[in-house]
Amino acid sequence: MNKSSILKEPRVTEKATVLEGSNVYTFNVPKSATKPEIVKMIKELYKVTPIKVRTVTMLAKKVFVRGKKGTKAGGKKAYIFLKKGDKIEIK
């Protein structure tokens, strides 16, 4: 896998923004990504070493919006925990 396929993009949500204050960063990753691959990409791209990585698989949800049925896509997200003083600059 290449660099861009492991870390798709930073996950910018209200919860993720609150967690950044405690040195936890959230990224969307493919379902096939493993924790060692994620750690390796964080080290290469951002030059920081994570303390730990937690992954969460999100299930697809059925939604009903404006009279139409549909589904929200599921996926996988990774929480990256850094030690104090380390930062990831999200562009």
Image (cartoon, helix red, strand yellow):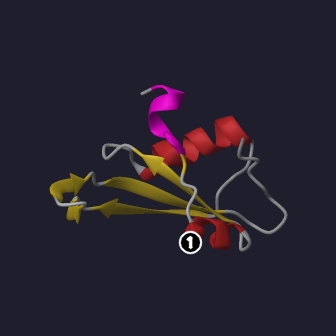
Q: Residue 45: where, in percent of width, then height?
A: 67, 36
Q: Is residue 32 left or right of residue 1?
A: left
The magenta stretch spans residue 7: yes
Q: Residue 16: where, in percent of width, then height?
A: 58, 66
Q: Is residue 18 left or right of residue 30?
A: right
Compared to residue 52, the image places residue 34 above or below, namely above
Q: Residue 18: where, in percent of width, then height?
A: 66, 73
Q: Please tell me which residue is depicted at 43% across the width and 46% down the height of the picture.
A: 29
Q: Please state which of residues 69 and 7 is positioned toward the viewer in this rendering.
A: 69
Quadrant placement of the C terminus: top right
Task: Tell me the residue that label 1 is attached to.
Answer: 15
Q: Residue 38: where, in percent of width, then height?
A: 51, 46
Magenta segment range? 2-9
Quadrant housing residue 20: bottom right
Q: Is residue 80 left or right of residue 20?
A: left
Quadrant housing residue 14: bottom right
Q: Please tell me which residue is depicted at 80% across the width and 69% down the height of the picture.
A: 84
